[in-house]
Image (cartoon, rainbow, N blue to C red):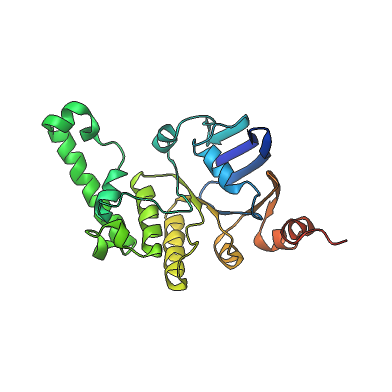
């Protein structure tokens, strides 16, 4: 199977502290890959480096055949790599619909002259983005709160808006950093169902998650990080039975 994302020898330090120590793994095209590891393993830092928030000190990140290490986030979004964050953020005065529209790709109305005077092309694109926003809201069951400010939403609904914003950018690979964290069980199941449907529709997903039940049910392959490195990867059963993984989570038995 071809790789949608390939990470090789990725290293990153902060003030002499080595956080990523040479991460190596590939996310297969069309897969629902799980990325797990104990707290402090470097998972979120890895997402930050891959998505352009941090510039890695060394190593390679390839989106299919394109080297992307060091590119800024807007360039990565343009080539199809989009990520979410652990904490769902937003603009308090904007509605759900406005948040979705904000993340729409290729908006000619963002240019100064088109924004001031308007153009047929800008109006047509805005109408297309609005239709896409309505469709994503219906898919994520957010259509009944489209006009609500994000501050009026529950924690789970805010996570759904975060996923919806990512989908508005038309990704080919989606990096999700704990999208179910702090969400009540019923909405957790709803989010999981949405992600499975998106993956079955062809979207490659790489998911950081601490709920091993969800990882077991949703993800193949599963990649394990520990101390800034890739520890192992395989099926959930394979990595769960690996003594190195058990030691990373529970400590070494003396």
Please indicate, yes or no, whether residue 2 appears anywhere in the rendered image.
Answer: no
Residue drawn at x 24%, y 33% as measured from the top left: 110
**Where residue 72 appears, x then y in whole percent?**
45, 31
Count of labels in the image = 0
215 with respect to 51 (left or right): right
Quarter location, residue 39: bottom right
**Where residue 82 appears, x then y in whole percent?**
44, 43
**138 above or below 61?**
below
166 with respect to 235 (left or right): left
Please indicate, yes or no, whether residue 128 appears anywhere in the rendered image.
Answer: yes
- Residue extending farthest to the right is 254
Residue drawn at x 29%, y 58% as measured from the top left: 137
Quarter location, residue 120: top left
Quarter location, residue 240: bottom right
Residue drawn at x 58%, y 62% as measured from the top left: 215
- Residue extending farthest to the bottom is 186
**21 above or below 197?**
above
Pick the quarter of the image with the C terminus. bottom right
Q: Nearer the viewer, residue 198 or 188?
A: 188
Residue drawn at x 65%, y 61% as measured from the top left: 236
**207 above or below 117?**
below
**Where residue 221 appears, x then y in whole percent?**
61, 54
**Where residue 16 appears, x then y in whole percent?**
68, 32
- Residue extending farthest to the front is 15
161 with respect to 42 (left or right): left
């Amino acid at each position: 199977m071809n790789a949608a994302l390939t990470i090789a020898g990725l290293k990153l330090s902060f003030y002499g502290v080595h956080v990523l120590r040479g991460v190596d793994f590939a996310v297969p095209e069309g897969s629902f890959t799980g990325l797990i590891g104990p707290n402090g393993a470097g998972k979120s830092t890895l997402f930050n480096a891959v998505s352009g928030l941090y510039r890695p000190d060394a190593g390679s990140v390839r989106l299919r055949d394109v080297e992307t290490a060091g590119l800024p986030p807007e360039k990565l979004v343009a080539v199809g790599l989009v990520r979410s964050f652990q904490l769902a953020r937003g603009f308090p005065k904007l509605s759900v619909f406005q948040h979705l529209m904000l993340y729409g790709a290729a908006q000619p109305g963002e240019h100064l002259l088109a924004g001031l005077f308007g153009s047929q092309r800008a109006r047509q694109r805005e109408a297309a983005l609005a239709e896409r926003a309505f469709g994503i809201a219906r898919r994520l069951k957010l259509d009944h709160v489209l006009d609500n400010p994000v501050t009026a939403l529950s924690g789970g609904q805010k996570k759904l808006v975060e996923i919806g914003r990512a989908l508005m950018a038309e990704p080919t690979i989606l990096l999700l950093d704990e999208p179910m964290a702090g969400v009540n069980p019923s909405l957790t199941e709803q989010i999981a169902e949405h992600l499975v449907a998106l993956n079955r529709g062809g979207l490659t997903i790489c998911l950081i998650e601490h709920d091993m039940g969800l990882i077991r049910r949703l993800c193949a392959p599963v990649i394990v990080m520990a101390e800034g490195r890739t520890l192992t990867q395989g099926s959930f059963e394979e990595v769960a039975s690996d003594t190195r993984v058990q030691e990373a989570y529970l400590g070494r038995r003396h």
